[in-house]
Structure formats: C-alpha cells, structure tokens
Amino acid sequence: MYLFKDDEVMMLRSLPAILLISLFSFSAIASDMETSADDVVSYDLSDLLKVLGNALAVHDELPTLEESKFLGRDMEDAQSDIDKLVDEAIGMLGSKTIKELRTQYRKLERKIEQVNSDIVGYKSKRILAPTSGKSMVGSVTPTQTLKRFVASTKGDYDQLIEAAEKDLAAYKSDLASIKDELRQALASIGVTVNTEQLETLMSSVVGDDIISMSVVFRTIKDVTDQLEALSNETSESLEHAKKYYGMVVILYRIVTTMQDTFIARVDEHYLPKLVAYKDEANANIKESRLLMKNGVNVDILKANVQANKLTIEVIELYTKMLKDQKAKVEKARDIASKEGLVADNTYRTVSLSSAVVSMIREGRNTFETLMGIQMPDIRVFKNEDVRSEFQKLTEKMNAS
C-alpha cells in the first residue's frame, strides 16, 4: 500500500496555515457568534491524505489482478481493502461536534421520556394512596430514587410529581439549547432547518444518516479545495498532481458508498417493516369491527379502530418521506456514479498537471451539487398525535 514519503509529509506541514483546517471547540463559541463550517468540521489533513493515498494505491492495483483466484490476491481482496479504507475515511470526515450534539439530544430525549413515564406512574399510584399527609419515611429519605420505593401517601406522590416536573422542565430547557446549537451547526454546512423541521429530522430513522451524509459531503468539498491547493503547490510535479486527482476518485467512492448504504437500508430494512406494521394495523381494525358486531365494549373497540387508523396514517406519511428521500439519494447516486467513472477514466489518462487542477475543481463543484440534491424536504407534523405516533414507529423500527 502507498505510504506518504517523509518529504511529502514535510511539504504538507509547511503549507500556509489557510490550507489547514483548525480544530475549534464548538462549546467555546460565544452564544452571540454565528457558527461557521470551520467550527464544526475538523479533520487532520495529513492523516486523511494517507488513508486516501493508501486507498488509491489499492485502486491502482486492481487492473493487475485477476477477478477471482483460489490462491493469492485477487480483485475481491483488493475491493475489500478499499472498502475498509473508505470506512476509515468516512469516520475521519465526520463532525465530532455534530456527533456529540446528536448524542446529547438522544440522551435528553430518553430522560424526558422516562420522566414523563414516571409522572404517569406516580399519578396512577396516587389515586389508590391514602389521603393522609406526607409519610415520615418519605420526608426523611435522602434521594428521589429511595423516595420512589417508600412513597405511600398522596402527599408522598405529590412530592414525587413536583420533583419530576421540575426535572422535566430542566431537561426540556437543555434540549431546546441543544436543538439551537445543532440547528446552527447544520446551517453552517448547508442544512438549513427550523426547530420543528429539526425535530422531524431527528425523529426519523434516517435522520442520522441524512445528517452524516451532509457532514461528510460538506467536508469532502472542503478536502477538494485542499487537493487543488496541493496541486498548485506541486505544479511542477505531474506525479504529485495526478496522485491528488486520484484521491478525488476515491472521494467519489466514499460518496457512492454512503449513498448505497442509505438506499439499501431503506429498501431492505425500513420500508418492509412499515409494510408489516400497516398489515398489522389493518388486521387489528378488521378484528375490532368483527368484535363490534357482538355489541360488547363497542366504544373501546371504536377507539381501537381510530387508533389503528392514526397508525396507518402515520405509516403512510413515514413511507412517503422515506421514499422521497431515497429518490433524492438515488438521483444523486446516479450523478456521483457517472462522474466517478469519468474521473477514474481521466485519472488513468491524465498527462498535464495544469489540467489536473481544473479537474479537481470540477470535482469539488460536483460534490457541492450532490449535497444540494440530497437535502431533505422536511415536513412538520400536523399535530401532536401524529408526532407521537411517528416517534413510536421510529423507536419500534430501531428496536427490532
């Protein structure tokens, strides 16, 4: 595999500071400052170029290998090596800032869900509790967790409900802050959403995939700027210039890999699950209507029918959203695949370093176009019932 030579590493380190992406702590940004892409996108250019160079070396090896052989290295082995290097590069191209914000967002969502569940439980137990004041044990128990176990009177449960509601308010406040930070971070890389749209995106099973692709594609565009600058710096060396353009070929491979993964996940995992959920809901409606003919618990059965109809409505909304987003990614995938083939062909035949710079610049423009095509059309929920059902479906699909 290709490894950068010492003189090349030294050349990278000696580049003007403007060519290097600085590592900037998102949390250090003042609240009144606008977030920029450089604040949320960070990577080590030298390390990334080593990975891309290694992938390019294997890519160059492919024409010399047999498609398949019983003993020894073949094209399948080489493709596997490239896939591993592409996965490594994807990890390097992501945004730690956005990843951390998404993690905090998910943790707060889980805490809010748990506290809401606790409140419902306290209120249910309170109904059956005696009406006397706070129990002595409940008053002196030092922690909220212990108080939960010893609570016995309505006063105890009132105390637990009050504390839980304070926790809930604090978590919601923290979540609002995280939403604002995440929205600003996404805006800096070209994903402009309002708070409600962000909630929709984060509630979807593909929300994280969409955000990850947006981050990586935005970073790839930035990397091509660096490759163009490197080609200019080494304009007297066709070998170096061609190698940098070859890295653009690998960047196309990264893009199509992420797109293929997304399309396969939607087709093979999420859409079949939604079909199964819809079949289940229709079966529940059919059974409820049959039971209504007996004239027993008709009101409950009618409510069950309406609940399943709402589920079907949300499933259809979810299905359309996934299909629409998949269509966008497929359109971008088609462009990326064709452009990647042209780039590969050009890489193998390039002979002028001056032409290489313009081709790298063209690759950058293509990556920017692809990112624009894949931006989701995010619709907000028409009411809280739909939002809640949407979230339940997401949790169900993630769990199974």
Image (cartoon, rainbow, N blue to C red):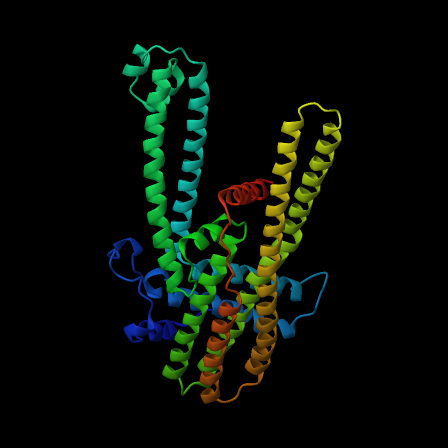
Q: Which of these two is toward me, 289 or 238?
A: 289
Left or right of 16 in this view: 210: right
Picture quarter containing residue 298? top right
Judge whether residue 2 can be spotted in this image.
Answer: no
Residue at 54%, 70% (x, y): give it. 252
Q: From the viewer's side, name the closer residue of 74 and 374.
A: 374
Q: Position of residue 290 (x, y in %)?
A: 75, 31
Residue 393, given in percent of the width and then of the height, sits at: 57, 43
Q: Residue at x 35, y 73 (%)?
A: 12
- Closer to the camera in the image, 300 or 171: 300
Question: Would you say residue 324 is visible in this rendering?
Answer: yes
Quadrant (top left/top right/bottom left/bottom right) for the C terminus: top right
Residue shown at 33%/22% (left/top)?
A: 159
Q: Using the image, determine if residue 128 lies above or below residue 387.
A: above
As drawn, 163 above or below 104: above
Residue 282 screen position, x and y as percent: 70, 40
| Residue placed most toward the observer, 37 or 124 | 124
